[in-house]
Amino acid sequence: MQIAFHGRDHNCTIEVETGITIRQALETANILPSTVVVSYDDRILPHNTVLQADVKLLVTTVSSGG
């Protein structure tokens, strides 16, 4: 199954097994899960969402500081 991540800071496609979570897919793509929010069709998805088919996900980097 193919997962495509796109966004201002990320643009990559990975090949993974069906049933992987978004967190696992992010880690496979070398994207630190704690630094991003993932969305599909304008809906934010929890990182524990299980993926069952090819999908293109928007990755938004979250900034913080003080």
Image (cartoon, rainbow, N blue to C red):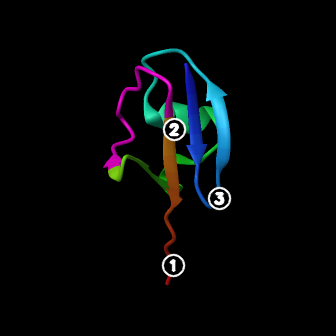
User: Residue lying farthest front?
Assistant: 41
Q: Is residue 12 above or below residue 21?
A: below
**Callout 3 amino acid:** Asp
**Residue 47, how many percent across, how many down?**
39, 40
Q: Name the residue under label 3.
A: 9
Return the mark for residue 6.
Answer: none
* Mark 3 vs 1: CB contact within 8 A: no
Q: How crowded is mark 3: few (under 14 residues within 10 Å), some or many (20 or more)?
A: few
- In this image, 66 relative to 41: left or right? right
Q: How far apart are marks 3 and 2 (CA)?
A: 15 Å
Q: Name the residue under label 1.
A: 65
Q: Give the range drawn in magenta.
A: 44-55
Using the image, determine if residue 4 lies above or below residue 58: above
Determine the CA span between mark 2 and mark 1: 29 Å
Comparing labels 3 and 1, the label whose residue is closer to the camera: 3
In the image, is residue 51 part of the stretch drawn in magenta? yes
Identified by mark 1, the residue type is: Gly
Labels 2, 1: front one: 2
Which percent across, then down, holds residue 28?
Answer: 62, 32
* Residue type (three-letter) at the residue carrying disc 2: Lys
Between 52 and 24, the residue placed more toward the observer is: 52
Relative to 5, 57 lies left or right: left
> Is most of the magenta stretch helix, strand or loop?
loop
Nearer to me, 38 or 4: 4
In the rendered image, residue 58, in percent from the top left (x then y), is placed at 50, 49
Q: Is mark 2 on a helix, strand or loop?
A: strand
